[in-house]
Amino acid sequence: MEACSRAGTTSSLWAQAINLSRLVFRFLLELLCLRPTLLKEFKIRAQVDSLPMELETLVGTLPGLPLDVLEVILGSLEIPDLIRAGSICCSWRAAYTSLRDLGRYKQSQTPCLFYSSKSAGNNVACLYSLVEKRVYKLTLPEPPIRSRILIGSSNGWLITADERLELLLVNPVTGEQIALPSVVTIEHVKPIFDGSGDIQKFELSYYTGEKVYREPEIHDRNDLREELYFKAFLFPDLSSGSYIAVLIHHPYYQLSFARAGDDKWTWLPPNSGYRDCMYMDGVLYALTNLGEIDAFDLSGSTVTRTVIVGKVKDYIYESMYIIPSPWGGLLQVWRIVDIPRHEVG
């Protein structure tokens, strides 16, 4: 049984190496202006022990390719193949690390389905690859991923809220984790302590930058986690080489943001009703449920707000998104949701 298992593993590794090599060779043939039929010869002769003379020479020179050339090649791979390529040799590992750590990996990825399961364990996340039609099981750091709720995903990172209501960025591929500012630094949230100095409950205030709507309410942890968080984003900040986290939260779908290293969330009044946002060239564009677009300039020490699109409708029942257009403008995308007439107040 052990021999069969080893043979199966060896066969699987060989098959993965062949598939990865085909991807790499495809780009090398273009870069080095070699004849395209070499790839076909490689596919045919991969079943035997010999390779064409040109391919033998090519294989021997792979580790010695310049770093920038390797980055071009590896940067065109899907994430699973990129990780496999990083384990081939030292120079490939260096290219993989450079792409990962310096944010140079720009290849659009086929979406993966992220989920957890009781049978896999509390700290194990599952990624189903639509390309490979297989599941990857990834062990993530504490707290257990099954105890968190997912409120956003951006640029390969997941934004999660744990049982303490604290927000954590986690990269399911690398296992890296970053804590965002505490929930008690959000403008509308105040902690209530017990006699031991531990947080027992939270007070949530119901006001915007324009109006106080009602008296504050007291929530326990579980209730507030479901009530408070709507959507979160993580945007690369090219000016600082770091990131900006943006949170749409209750009450009334308001905005707060935090830069890398901040110890608190910064509230962005006075508007509310936000549904989506995007960040470009130091400006945060935020879309409301009435079709308004507010532009917040976050590039300076003082945040400024400009209304670039006013109210479009009085009542909107669509799910709404904001995206950049190919010509450099902004587009609103509305997904129609059918509302039965008797449910419209």
Image: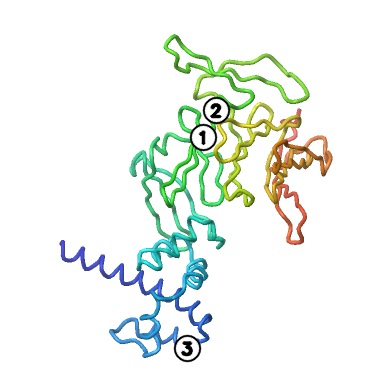
Characterize the local packing of mark 1: few (<14), some (14-19) or many (20 or more) Cα atoms within 10 angstroms.
many
Q: In this orientation, which residue lies closer to the viewer: 181 or 112?
A: 181
What amino acid is labelled 2 in the image? Val
Q: Are marks 2 and 1 in contact (CB under 8 Å)?
A: yes
Quickly name the residue at label 2: 183
In the rendered view, tell whether residue 55 sits above or below residue 101: below
In the rendered view, tell whether residue 250 sits above or below residue 201: below
The span from disc 2 to disc 1 (Cα, nearest Å) is 7 Å
The answer to which of marks 1 and 3 sits earlier in the sequence is 3
In the rendered view, tell whether residue 168 sits above or below residue 31: above
Q: Quadrant of the N terminus?
A: bottom left
> SS for tag 2?
helix
Query: Residue shown at 37%/51% (left/top)?
Result: 137
Query: Residue shown at 38%/74% (left/top)?
Result: 63
Q: Quadrant of the C terminus?
A: top right
Quickly name the residue at label 3: 37
Characterize the local packing of mark 2: few (<14), some (14-19) or many (20 or more) Cα atoms within 10 angstroms.
many
Quickly name the residue at label 1: 167
x, y (%) of residue 219?
55, 18
Which of the 4 image quadrants contains residue 307?
top right
x, y (%) of residue 89?
35, 68
Which of the 4 image quadrants contains residue 47?
bottom left
Q: Is residue 221 left or right of residue 322?
A: left
Front label number (1 vs 3): 1
The answer to which of marks 2 and 1 sits earlier in the sequence is 1
x, y (%) of residue 46?
34, 81
What amino acid is labelled 3 in the image? Thr
Q: Are marks 3 and 2 in contact (CB under 8 Å)?
A: no
> SS for tag 3?
helix
The span from disc 1 to disc 3 (Cα, nearest Å) is 52 Å
Q: In this orientation, which residue lies closer to the viewer: 186 or 70?
A: 70
Query: Residue shown at 52%/68% (left/top)?
Result: 76
